[in-house]
Image: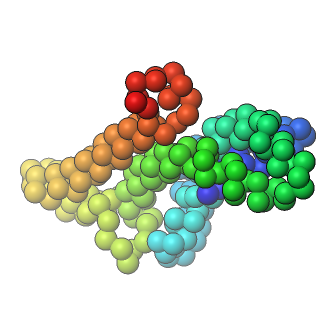
Amino acid sequence: MTGTAIGMVAGYYGGKTDEVISRLVDIVMTIPTFPPLLLVLSILIMPGIYMISFLMGAIGGTHSARVIRAQVLSLSETSHILGSRALGLSDTYIMLRHIIPPNVLPLITVKFVFSAQGFMLMGVGLGFLGIGDAAVIDWGQMINRAYASGAFALGLWWWIIPPGLAVTVLSVGLAMIGFGLEDRLNPRLRQRNPEVSA
């Protein structure tokens, strides 16, 4: 949601607004998501699952802004958008009615799936480090407890393989769904590969 909102505003209004937002996004994208998240969560006392999810979205949600911005920037100069502006329709109405549903929503869907994969792995890493929500048992905590109990040294594979396999299968599954949706829904890829849309 953060990247979508930022990309929509930058692409639709263009000009100096786009330039300022794009430069800020470029700066934020150079910063890895995990270290700032780790720092903030280590300061908080007993962060809950909702707080962790919010921080993940706020810190790492800008990575899709550039793709959304490029799509909206090209759409904002089309004849039907210019005609809607000439009719006096509000910017919010144009974005919600003429830009997001037909053109940007497929990109948002694809980016959401890829982001879900990244955030899932990030959550597993936080659980393994013991910084996640202690009230929620996740795969990261299971791997951590197996490691702390000496399962690796004792060869207790039934403690290690199930959570590790679950993380791997879900991550690969989300990646495959994302690639499949990207081929089907991304308008630029459809133009390059006409047989995909057939």
Rendering quarter of residue 14 = top right
Rendering quarter of residue 32 = top right
From the viewer's perspective, tell me whether residue 57 is left or right of residue 94. Answer: left
- Percent from the top left, x then y, of residue 112? 50, 51
Q: Nearer the viewer, residue 4 or 163?
A: 4
From the viewer's perspective, tell me whether residue 168 is left or right of residue 88. Answer: left
From the viewer's perspective, tell me whether residue 172 is left or right of residue 72. Answer: left
**Image height of 129 relative to 186, above or below:** below
- Percent from the top left, x then y, of residue 105? 57, 50
Residue 167 is at least partly visible in this image: yes
Q: Going by the picture, which residue comes out furthest to the top?
A: 192
Q: Residue at the spot x=55%, y=71% of the render? A: 51
Q: Nearer the viewer, residue 162 or 12?
A: 12
**Image height of 168 relative to 44, above or below:** above
Q: Residue at the spot x=42%, y=41% of the render? A: 181
Rendering quarter of residue 83 = top right
Q: Nearer the viewer, residue 198 or 11?
A: 198
Q: Quadrant of the C terminus?
A: top left
Q: Residue at the spot x=49%, y=75% of the render? A: 48
- Percent from the top left, x then y, of residue 29? 65, 40
From the viewer's perspective, tell me whether residue 95 is left or right of residue 108. Answer: right
Q: Nearer the viewer, residue 192 or 3?
A: 192
Q: Residue at the spot x=40%, y=24% of the render? A: 195
